[in-house]
Amino acid sequence: MFKNKSFWEMDELRIIVGAMVILAFATGLLVVLPYLLLEDVQAPEGLKPYSKEQLAGRQVYIANGCVYCHSQQPRDPAQGPDQKRGWGRASIAGDYKYDTPHLLGTMRTGPDLFNIGARQPSKDWHLGHLYQPRAYTPGSIMPAYPFLFENRVGLAKEGEEVVNLPAGVIQDGHVIIAKPEAIYLVQYLQSLNHTYPALNSDIREKRDSN
């Protein structure tokens, strides 16, 4: 009886040790090694740190769950038609140098936003699209964000951001005022412009050849 008990205890010990070894190996391979490889990644020339307002807009982006429907990671042409869709070149690690946390996204209910600042630089378009997406993209399933705006009867006050909307979107005599959260969110979206070359070496080669 004692012999059998000792045998089972040894077997349980092997299972526990084996599980710990597998866990340690997986952690090293998937967490520690990528961290060491990316620790010294440099930001590409042309990538600028976010401003205070853009960072505030980034928090609005996170708070409203934009990351659940939009990715920020175009694929290589060999892996998908993202470049043909106008979403830009495949992203590299350096593109996310100033992103904490990273907002890569895993779903594409909406288009990839890696280069939305280049594809659509208009502040008026973004504000109007946030207020009522279907006024700009018929059939869009993107939710509207009216709580980021104030619908007011009368005139705007000095310094307020009035949203220029297509005819028929709001009632006559009303104005739509963008709240700071909407303005900051748009500034963040406008900052998503990764049209610079992917690698610093590519930039230097082009510069030296000129």
Image: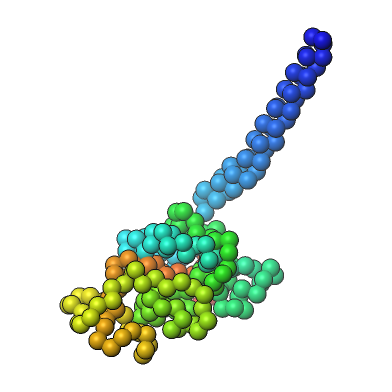
The residue drawn where x is 53% and y is 66% is 69
Picture coordinates of residue 204 (x, y %)?
51, 68
Drawn side of residue 180 relative to residue 83, left or right = left
Picture coordinates of residue 167 (x, y %)?
36, 90
Query: Can you see residue 102?
Result: yes
Locate the N terminus by quadrant: top right
Q: Please identify the quarter of the rendering in which residue 172 is found.
A: bottom left
Q: Nearer the viewer, residue 124 or 75?
A: 124
Residue pushed farthest top? 2
Q: Is residue 24 above or below residue 98?
A: above
Picture coordinates of residue 104 (x, y %)?
53, 60
Q: Is residue 54 above or below residue 166?
A: above
Query: Can you see residue 196?
Result: no
Colour scheme: rainbow
The residue drawn where x is 55% and y is 58% is 93
The residue drawn where x is 74% and y is 28% is 15
Picture coordinates of residue 24 (x, y %)?
65, 35
The residue drawn where x is 34% and y is 61% is 56
Q: Nearer the viewer, residue 139 or 79?
A: 139
Drawn side of residue 8 relative to residue 149, left or right = right
How many numbered circles does the render carry? 0
Residue pushed farthest left? 158
Residue pushed farthest bottom? 167
